Image (tube, rainbow, N blue to C red):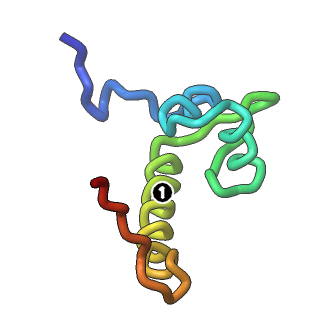
Amino acid sequence: MAIDTVEHRPRFYTARETARILRLGDGRALQLIRDKKIRSIRIGHTIRVSADAIREFENSFATSTEAQGAEDTNGREPARARRST
C-alpha cells in the first residue's frame, strides 16, 4: 500500500512531473512556466515547481473558468441539445 501523505510527497517537481500532474504536454507546461503562469525556481539549468505553485495554478484556472462560464454564450442563450427522433 502506497503512503500518500504530505510528508511523503515531493515538495518540488520537475517540469515534466508538473506536466503529468496537470495532464498537459511537456511543451505546454514549459510554456506556462516561461509565461510565469506557473511559479517556478531555477536551480542551475533545472526548473523546479513547488507543490504550492501547482495548487495555485489549479485554483486560479478553476476560478477563471467558473467566472467565464456565465459569459461563454456572449449574452445569448446556451445552445440546446438537438432531439433525436
Q: Is residue 37 above or below residue 71?
A: above
Q: Amino acid at mark 1?
A: Glu
Q: Is residue 85 above or below residue 51?
A: below
Residue 79 percent location from the top left of the image: 43, 71
Q: Describe residue 71's horizontal placement relative to residue 32 as left or right.
A: left
Q: Counting other residues with Cα less than 10 Å from the Cα at mark 1, is it few (<14), some (14-19), or many (20 or more)?
A: some
Q: Residue furthest front?
A: 85
Q: Residue 78: where, in percent of width, then height?
A: 42, 76
Residue drawn at x 74%, y 29% is 46
Q: Secondary structure at mark 1?
A: helix
Q: Label 1: which residue?
A: 56
Which residue occupies the foreground of this view, 70 or 18? 70
With respect to residue 76, does 45 lie above or below? above
Horizontal side, residue 38 vs residue 69: left or right = right
Tell me which residue sits at (75%, 55%) in the image: 35
Residue furthest to the top in view is: 1
Tally the numbered discs. Answer: 1
* Image quadrant assignment for residue 26: top right
- Residue at the far left in the pictured view: 1
Residue pictured at 28% horizontal, 54% vertical: 85
Q: Quadrant of the N terminus?
A: top left
In this picture, is 8 found above or below 62? above
Image coordinates for residue 40, horizontal then vertical, percent:
65, 46
**Residue drawn 43% across and 59% down?**
59
x, y percentage for residue 68?
Answer: 49, 75
